[in-house]
Image (cartoon, rainbow, N blue to C red):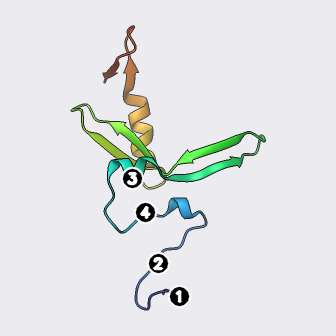
């Protein structure tokens, strides 16, 4: 049920930065979106969380991973990323 558009499920979230646009967006547009901007966390530190994490694929392509929807893939990318002694990324 939707308040704004009858017959359309709006899937509301607590955090507007968690929403995924229904309109196509470029990697550059996604890279500029913030889910959380300068909000204190439980320790009192201020945090900023991007809506999308932009990662380089092994084939050189860039991919936008949504911080909620793609959280498992983001974790996989972090585990796979390794750097050599020159600081160059090595893929497992």
Numbered disc 2: secondary structure: loop
Q: Nearer the viewer, mark 3 or mark 4?
A: 3
User: Residue beneath label 3, please?
Assistant: 29
Q: Is residue 68 left or right of residue 25?
A: right
**Disc 4 or 2, which lies upstream in sequence?**
2
**Disc 3 or 2, which lies upstream in sequence?**
2
**Disc 3 or 4, which lies upstream in sequence?**
4
Q: Residue at x 46, y 49 (%)?
A: 32
Q: Quadrant of residue 35?
A: bottom right
Q: Nearer the viewer, residue 34 or 74?
A: 34
Q: Nearer the viewer, mark 3 or mark 1?
A: 3
Q: Mark 1 to mark 4: distance in Å?
A: 18 Å
User: Residue beneath label 4, please?
Assistant: 20
Q: Mark 3 to mark 4: distance in Å?
A: 12 Å
Q: Is residue 7 left or right of residue 43?
A: left
Q: Mark 2 to mark 1: distance in Å?
A: 8 Å
Q: Residue at x 39, y 21 (%)?
A: 82
Numbered disc 1: secondary structure: loop
Q: Name the residue at the bottom extreme.
A: 6
Labels 2 and 1 touching (C-beta < 8 A): yes
**Disc 1 or 4, which lies upstream in sequence?**
1
Compared to residue 68, the image places residue 73 above or below, namely above
**Disc 2 or 1, which lies upstream in sequence?**
1
Q: Name the residue at the top extreme.
A: 85
Labels 4 and 2 touching (C-beta < 8 A): no
Where residue 52 appears, x then y in whole percent? Answer: 44, 49
User: Residue beneath label 1, please?
Assistant: 3
Q: Is residue 53 left or right of residue 91?
A: right
Compared to residue 90, the image places residue 68 above or below, namely below
Q: Mark 4 to mark 2: distance in Å?
A: 11 Å
């Amino acid at each position: 049920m939707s308040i704004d558009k009858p017959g359309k499920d709006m899937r509301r979230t607590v955090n507007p930065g968690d929403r995924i646009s229904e309109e196509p967006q470029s990697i550059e547009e996604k890279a500029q979106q913030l889910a959380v901007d300068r909000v204190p966390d439980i320790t009192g530190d201020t945090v900023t969380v991007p809506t999308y994490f932009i990662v380089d694929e092994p084939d050189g392509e860039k991919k936008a991973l949504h911080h909620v929807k793609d959280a498992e893939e983001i974790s996989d990318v972090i585990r796979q990323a390794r750097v050599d002694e020159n600081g160059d990324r090595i893929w497992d």
